[in-house]
Amino acid sequence: HLPVTLGLFMIGAFSISGFPLFNGFISKSIIVSAAGYDHREVIMLLLLLASVGTFLHTGLKIPVFTFWGPDRGLKPGPVPRNMLIAMGIVAFLCTFYGVYPAALYQFLPYDVGYHPYTVAHLIEAVQLLTFTFIGFWLLRQKLAGEPYLPVDTDWIYRRGLRRPAAALVSGVNACFAAGERARHALVAGVTRRAANPLPRSPAEDGAEPSYDADAQRPPLGLGLGLTVAFLIVLTLVALVAG
């Protein structure tokens, strides 16, 4: 339903996953290479695992289960143009810095001599992404979302402290709900009364008397005439008093 949105999303997903020709391939590689150059193998391994998790989640799980998931009868509307423009600008920058990394280097506070598009680095990236995709495809049924209730710290006051919570929360909520119902009833009554200002006595057949605004309401000229007359009297009084 949203092919343009999907395309722009995938550019962002490829970028953050470190695909070649996108900016993430440049920026993430600099950090990983710096960790390896400084002989911090554990940090380097953790960064590579983070790249795998990013591609697995953002580049595979979200688009597959969102755009190619089961049809649930939801028909998304058109995306606002300003949102498409914003995503398009970011997608262009992600691609531009990936193809031309020198434009990214100029923002760094020191000179950079890093060359990301080496044969070894490209092979490493392709292997990492390819085997991540294979693993996802083989286990995609287990990675699908499942409806469940996650247990968090709120369990303490939802279950363990149910009565104190009911005394402290339920009473306040009941007061707010009663006030809201009274407000709605007041607004509804005023609205009905303003829509039909005739006396509320029912007609002979028991029905509420009808109201014709054009025939039964005072003409606009009457109000204007009274206003003009009041201004004239006020002006005359001011002249006499002066």
Image: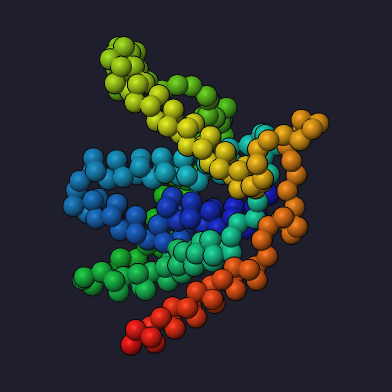
Up the image or down, 239 lies above or below 216; here it is below
Q: Tell me: 67 left or right of 109.
A: right
**How many numbered dots are placed on residues in this image?**
0
The answer, for residue 123, to whether it is visible in the render is: no
Where is residue 104 drawn, in percent x and y? 35, 69
Looking at the picture, does residue 221 appear above or below residue 217?
A: below
Would residue 19 appear left or right of 169 to someone viewing this image?
right
- Tell me if I can see residue 27 in this picture: yes
Q: Residue at x 48, y 55 (%)?
A: 12
Q: State the residue at coordinates (53%, 41%).
A: 187
Q: Who's the residue at 42% across and 68% down the image?
A: 97
Taking depth in this image into account, of 6 and 75 the one nearest to the observer is: 75
As drawn, the residue found furthest toward the front would be 240
Q: Position of residue 69 (x, y in %)?
A: 63, 36
Which residue is depicted at the point 47% across and 44% down?
A: 58
Between 150 and 141, the residue placed more toward the observer is: 150
